[in-house]
Image: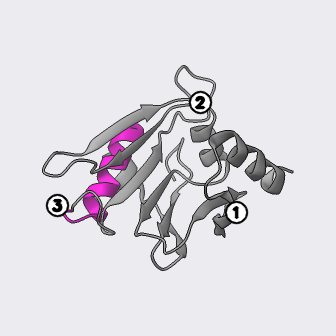
């Protein structure tokens, strides 16, 4: 794989509960400059052009760059792309912090999330292994309570 990339992304289908790892081909990252370019490429590859924002065919794509997780400036950045508004183009956010590097350290360059779950779930990723876990016990809790509960059940 090209330097700076892990060589795979995670596909999450919330409707079926299926998770799979797919290879990220060198030509895909060569033609996609950074996190934003990779996210846009994956969206264009996997989502119908006229998808409605709230439909199960829409995707939420979180993508890192080859510099994510390095000590270089902006090494914590990642991009999020989705169709958020009917009739408009794609919405994109560029974010920083520990989340992007942690995704890269876990073995993935991106996550493509599609579908609608019939029940509350959260995505747990650790050391290249991903799973959807029941989040019914988090329903109705505030952010602090959710954070405390999730740390208690997932943090080693």
The count of marks equals 3
The numbered mark, 2 or 3, whose residue comes first in the sequence reads: 3
Q: Which residue is mark 1?
A: 137
Residue 34 within the magenta-colored segment of the rendering:
yes
How far apart are labels 3 and 1 at the CA level?
Answer: 37 Å
Most common SS among magenta residues: helix
Q: Residues within 10 Å of mark 1 (few under 14, many from 20)?
A: few
Q: Is residue 18 above or below residue 62?
A: below
Q: Which residue is mark 3?
A: 49
Q: Nearer the viewer, residue 45 or 27?
A: 45
Residue at the right extreme, as displayed: 156
Q: Secondary structure at mark 3?
A: loop
**In terms of image quadrants, where is residue 33?**
top left
The magenta segment = 33-51
Q: Nearer the viewer, residue 63 or 92?
A: 92
Q: Which residue is mark 2?
A: 97
Question: Residue lying furthest bottom in this view?
Answer: 16
Residue situated in front as seen by the camera: 39 or 143: 143
Front disc: 2 or 1: 1
């Amino acid at each position: 794989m090209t330097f700076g990339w892990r060589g795979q992304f995670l596909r999450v289908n919330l409707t079926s509960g299926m998770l799979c790892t797919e290879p990220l081909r060198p030509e895909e990252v060569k033609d996609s400059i950074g996190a934003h370019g990779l996210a846009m490429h994956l969206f264009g590859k996997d989502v119908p052009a006229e998808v409605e924002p709230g439909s199960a065919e829409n995707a939420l794509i979180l993508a890192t760059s080859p510099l994510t997780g390095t000590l270089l400036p902006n090494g914590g950045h990642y991009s999020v792309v989705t169709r958020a508004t009917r009739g408009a183009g794609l919405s994109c956010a560029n974010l920083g912090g520990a989340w992007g590097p942690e995704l890269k350290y876990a073995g993935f360059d991106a996550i493509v999330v599609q579908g609608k779950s019939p029940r509350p779930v959260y995505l747990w990723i650790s050391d290249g292994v991903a799973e959807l876990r029941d989040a019914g016990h988090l329903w109705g809790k505030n952010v602090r309570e959710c954070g405390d509960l999730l740390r208690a059940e997932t943090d080693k």
